[in-house]
Image (cartoon, helix red, strand yellow):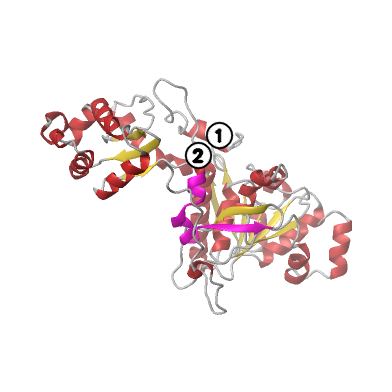
Amino acid sequence: MKSATAGPPAPSQATRAEPSTNAHYPLSGVTVIDLSHIYNGPYATFLMAMAGADVIKVEPHHGEHLRVRAALGSGVALPFAMLNANKRAVTMNLKAKRGRELLIDMVRKADVLVENFAPGVTERLGIGPEDLHKINPRLVYASSTGYGRSGPYRDYPAMDLTVQAMSGVMSITGFPDGPPVKSGPALCDFFAGIHLYGGIVTALYDREKTGVGRLVEVSMQEAVYASLSSNLGMYEGLGRKNPQRTGNRHGGMAEAPYNVYRANDGWVAIICPTNRHWDALIEAMGYQHLKEDPRFANLKLRVEHIDDIDDIVTSWTARHPRQYVVEKLQQHRVPHAPVRELDEVINDKHMHARGTLQNIQHPEYGELTVQHSPMRYEGVPLIPLKPSSKLGADGRDVFVNWLGLSESEFEQLVKEGVL
């Protein structure tokens, strides 16, 4: 039984309100030049756009990699549409001398430049951080790479999959008797994007005090390391020996129950970190006799008897529909959640009510459900979502109206293949 698959309610007026003319968003007045592609850089600049920044997305003439992938169909296009809303799209040939000169002219008027090329690429083009800081000392130059701009792994090729392997994420994911498994979401890319956003905003704050911008760099590998905390704790606890993969159990084997339990029509995740939660679960299951069972008197003992715990909990959950289990656990305030499929998540009434998820009619890709920023800023409504622009659609607006080229200059540069 899937109780959450009904279509979302109409969004509240508050989440869709147009910003008032005097609304002040935290990054209002900040101009961002976005040279990034795929996930981590575009997510950082998307968060900036949702905070009020003017983000100018600069792509090669054929489009960035994710836009090219989007040409395979509307479903494949969703990630591009999700990460590039509210950005002005232009194309530029950075291998052409005039293209690089135009980028430098843009940097003179910008506050932030974001790129996630391999280390050394922008330096070879003459648009690295040292080059651009000579042009605009106030510039925050933000760079995201797989392993950082220095160190032995600097030049290793990096994608989310390879960084999951290198970072340890893959080795701790899966079941003890199975192979390493990648994380379902693009964990390393998006962790890096979030850290990149935080680094940029921190550097902008510092610039307000010093008047000087700086290089901000984020490594995908380093951004994900802290998330290994439970597993690293078990590694230390075993005398610095590699632990087995724990499947859906706690990565540090420090909680019981802590697992995904089978209902007769789905799955429910349950965790009881305290005695109070364990007692509440006993009440929810109607297994009051377990209160006197010495095997489960405290957390340490429950972890020692984790197999017995899982068998007992499953003996209850497996007899009931998922929704019944969820309602019982909610009634007794046991930490839990149904394991929901993507169709349930994309129609989540809570996230639609808050405006986090929104259904839009995209001019290129049709009807899509896209996300807004997870961050909320008191005193201003969510910025209305503007669908991602067609390739180069905002070229005239940016280069003529913002940068100050004449119409004839713009047309000539288009003819020359620079723009």
Q: In the image, 179: left or right of 327?
A: right
Instruction: Name the secondary structure under disc 2.
Output: helix
First in sequence, mark 2 or 1: give its number.
1
| Residue that mark 1 sits on | 161
Circle 1 crowding by C-alpha within 10 Å: few under 14, some 14–19, many from 20: some
Q: Which mark is residue 75?
A: none
> Are the residues at dot 2 and dot 1 in contact (C-beta closer than 8 Å)?
no
Q: Name the residue at 45% across, 28% down.
A: 171
Where, by quadrant of the figure, is residue 173 drawn?
A: top left
Given residues 306 and 84, the one toward you in this image is 306
Q: Is residue 366 magenta?
A: no
The type of residue carrying mark 1 is Leu
Q: Position of residue 209 (x, y in %)?
A: 48, 68
Q: Do we see residue 399 in this rendering?
A: yes
- Report the residue that reaches farthest toward the bottom: 22
Q: Position of residue 375 (x, y in %)?
A: 47, 60
The type of residue carrying mark 2 is Gln
- Where does the magenta region start and end? 343-362
Which is more foreground, mark 2 or mark 1? Answer: 1
Q: Name the residue at 44% across, 42% down.
A: 340
Q: Position of residue 75 (x, y in %)?
A: 64, 44
Circle 2 crowding by C-alpha within 10 Å: few under 14, some 14–19, many from 20: many
| Residue that mark 2 sits on | 221
Q: Position of residue 203 (x, y in %)?
A: 51, 60
